[in-house]
Structure formats: structure tokens, C-alpha cells
Image (cartoon, rainbow, N blue to C red):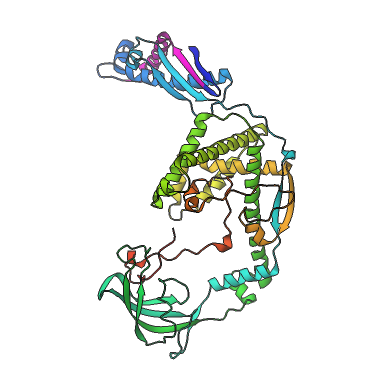
Amino acid sequence: MQIEETSAEGLSRELKITVAKDNLASRLDTKLLELKDQVQLKGFRKGKVPVAHLKKVYGSRLMSEILQEVVNDQSQQVLTDRDERPALQPEVNLDGDIENVISGDADFVFNMIYDIIPPITLAKFKDISFDRKVAEISDTEVDESIQRLAQSRKQFEPKAKTAKAASGDSVKIDFLGKIDDESFEGGAAEGFELELGSNQFIPGFEDQIIGKKAGDSFDIEVSFPEDYGNADLANKAAVFETTVHEVSGPKEIEINDEFATSMGMESLDQLKKMVREQIGKDYHNFSREQVKRDLLDKLSDAHDFELPTRMVDLEFNQIWHQFESELENQSKKIDELDETEDELRTEYREIAERRVRTGLVLAEIGSTNEIEVTQEEINQGLMERVRQFPGQEQEVFNYFRNNPEAMAQIRAPLFENKVIDFVIEQADVTDITVSIEELMAPPEEAEEKPKAKKKPAKKAPAKKAAAKKADTKEGDQKPAKKPAAKKPAAKKPAAKKPAAKKAPAKKKEDK
């Protein structure tokens, strides 16, 4: 085997590898001899087929297998001999007429093109310092959480027949919707139970039931929103012929030991303890995500080395594809945004470089310090992923088990978290007690502490903020969303669900 380095610029390498035809012929003869004792052809006894005849019948197929083996084996051997670590799987290009190689008339020549991982000098972790926000859990917060828990289990009981419906009550109704005196698909239901004030239906529908009592029949006049999910109904006026059959009021909920028992707890004190622990986990996880984001920023800033071009290109292409998909989903075009395409490409290129640099640093930390993800941890991660697909557990399990790349997606975040935990243990971390509002605040809204010395995160212009969801990979500096401000998803448009129990006047679902 002859190896010629045809190009070596920066981290890029290109090698020309030549394997003599005599070497290939020798490999072919070895395979033919192995095959002789196994194959049985018509007209020959097993093991008695002449090698020349086997070569005529199987030679081309076996030589193709040999060439694949040569590429795989020699590529790895070359990298080992040169003590180089490729950033990605090397690109292999065949040189010359492959048919002449298969026929045994020419040497086998192929080119290997790859980038190498540069030498990385790791920063001293003890020199990395940052603040870790922590929030104390108040008794009031625990009580409010239990109240919300009780509200989620709210039950109703029938009110007097003369009682008028009020916000918060539940009503059982029949309705028939019409547009221009014509009923429409999915616009009717019988015995539908609706909680007034839940905003389950389009604006104005529930309000017109307030003040009605059992036995009342009346028309509800509303207009479907302009952005309603069903384009055939959007922005159209409708009349719903409605009858109230029953008005029910919420039962009073007492937070006591009996309530705790209904939740599977032994006592109210135990319920409070459980809720406090859960809140603590949530705060811890939120705080850790902030620490992780800060740490990845600092690791990226603390290391400066040449990046493998092909690795950056691959990362950039993934980010840009996600960005274009987001634009398409929003029916937007690049020229409608606040930045030009060139400016966006430059910005996303920087993000790609940052991700690659951070990823290489994490890999180097893990390798240098022999940090590994155990098979047990991978199995646990796999089962957590499988549980996210109820009813498809076995299919999902088989998919990951039979797909090495998919299993790598299970391992990658586990490895990253172990490396980050390793660095955090050695870094200079200062715990700062803050309010829950400060803990949950997006980075640019959080009050800067004297020790933090962090630059506020750059806020995206209004027009492109939604489109820039491509920049959401682990570690990228993006404002965190405050959980409490999360808007509950509205119900799906009933016009798409003609089942009797679904109403057409529901709001469009937030996507």
C-alpha cells in the first residue's frame, strides 16, 4: 500500500492511497479457497469446484467485497499510523476505472478527504467562576401549589333549577350552529358540558350563557376569529341555537387530611412535603440550566483553536435548514426580516462555530478525564425516551436498539451532562439567593450581580425573533421562558372534529 499526502492545509487532509493489483489478487485467491469448501454448483461435487471456475462465477462479486474491506480497513489503519483523529467520517473518492480494478487489470486507487481534530489545551477549571441562582421555597408558594392542584381536581354539583349560570359554573347544553341559516359540519352537540370562563370556545360564546338557567333556550351570536383553524369558518358570523339543560356549581374544596388522602398521601403534612420537594426539583433544574448555559459560554470563550471546516459546515447547514423550515411554517420570507440573508448567514455561522468549539472542548474534557456513560445509564435514558410514546413503546424501543445513530442521540446529552457536572465541581461557583421572579427571569431581564460580570444576552429584533428558533441547541445563549407565564394551549377547532361531543366554537390551537 502506498500513501501520498496530496493536500494538507490547516486541519484539512487529502491522501491518495494505492493498493497494488497483486495484493488484491492475493486476497481474492484466499476468499476463493474459503469459498471452495462451502459452495456447491451443479455438475460438481461439494469442495471439488475448480478455483478458476469459482473465479469466473463469483470473482466480480468477491472483488467488490474486497475493495469495500480495503477502504474500511486501510482508512482506519492510515489514521492510526498517522496518529490523527478525524473530525467526521472521512470522505472516500475512487480514482480511475473501477471495472479495471475488479477485473484485476489495474491497481486500486482511492482518495481520503477529511479534517482532523486540532490539539486542544484545556483551560483550568478552577479559574472559571460564575454565580448560581437559588431560590428559597416559601410556605405560601407550597399552599398556592396545593390550591392549584385542588382546582385541577375540581368537581361540580347541580344547582337549583332557578339558579342562573355564573362564571366558574359548569353547564350542560345542546347547540346547533348556523352560518347564513345553514348548519355546518361539526357545529352541533348534545349534552355538552362546558365550564364557563374556561375560554374553551371562541370569544363571546361562553359570555352569552352567563345569566341563563336550566330550561332556557336562546341564540348565541358570535363571529369566528380571523385566524381560526378552519379557513371555511374564519371571520364568519354564526348563530348557535342553544338550550341549557343543567347548571352546576363547583364544590367547595377543603385542603385537609381527607383531601391529601384522596391524592394518595397519608396526611396533609406529607402532601405539603411532597409538593415542596417537587418545587425544589423544578427550581434546581431551572437553576442548573442557567448554570449550564453560563458554563458553556465560558468554556467557549476560554478556548481558542482552529475549527474543522467540514464540521462547521455540517452544523451550519443543520441550523440554516431549521431556520428555513421555521420561516416556511410561519409563511414568511427572508426579505421580510430585519436582517439581510448575508447578515443572518454570518450570525448563524458564528453560532455553528460556537457549537462545534464547545462540543470539541466537552469531548476533550471527557476523554482527558476518562468520563464515560455506562450502559446502565444509556438503558435508563432509552426507557425515559420510550415512555414519551405511550402505545408505541415496543416500536420506539426497537428503533433505537437497531439504529446506532439514534442510540448516539441518547448517549450524547448524558455524556454532556456528566462532563458539565465534572467541571462545575471544580469551578468557582457562588450561590446567590434570589426571588423566584429573578430565578425565572430571562437573562436580559435578570438583575446583574457584581460578581457575574456577564454581558446581557442579545435580544433578537421583533420581526425575526420567532424565526430564529434555530438557535436553540443546548448551551446557546437564549432567553429562558418563565414557566408561570406559559399560556395554556387552546382547544382544537371543533370544525375539524365532527364528533358529537365536540363544539365548533372552540379556539384555534396554539402551535
Please say if 423 is above or below 497: above
Residue 426 lies left or right of residue 290; in this view the side is right
The answer to whether residue 128 is above or below residue 68 is below
Quarter of the C terminus within the rendering: bottom left
Q: Nearer the viewer, residue 259 or 422?
A: 422
What is the residue that sits farthest to the bottom in this orientation?
Answer: 162
Q: How many numbered callouts?
A: 0
Query: From which residue to which does the magenta span run?
Result: 13-39
Which residue appears at 41% of the width and 75% of the height? 204
Judge whether residue 398 can be spotted in this image. Answer: no
Q: Position of residue 433 (x, y in %)?
A: 73, 57
Q: Quadrant of residue 350?
A: top right
Q: Position of residue 409 (x, y in %)?
A: 51, 42
Picture residue at 56% right of the left edge, 17% below the top: 81
Q: Is residue 15 magenta?
A: yes
**Magenta-colored stretch includes residue 256:** no
| Relative image position of residue 438 (x, y in whole percent) | 66, 59
Quadrant of the image occupied by residue 134:
bottom right
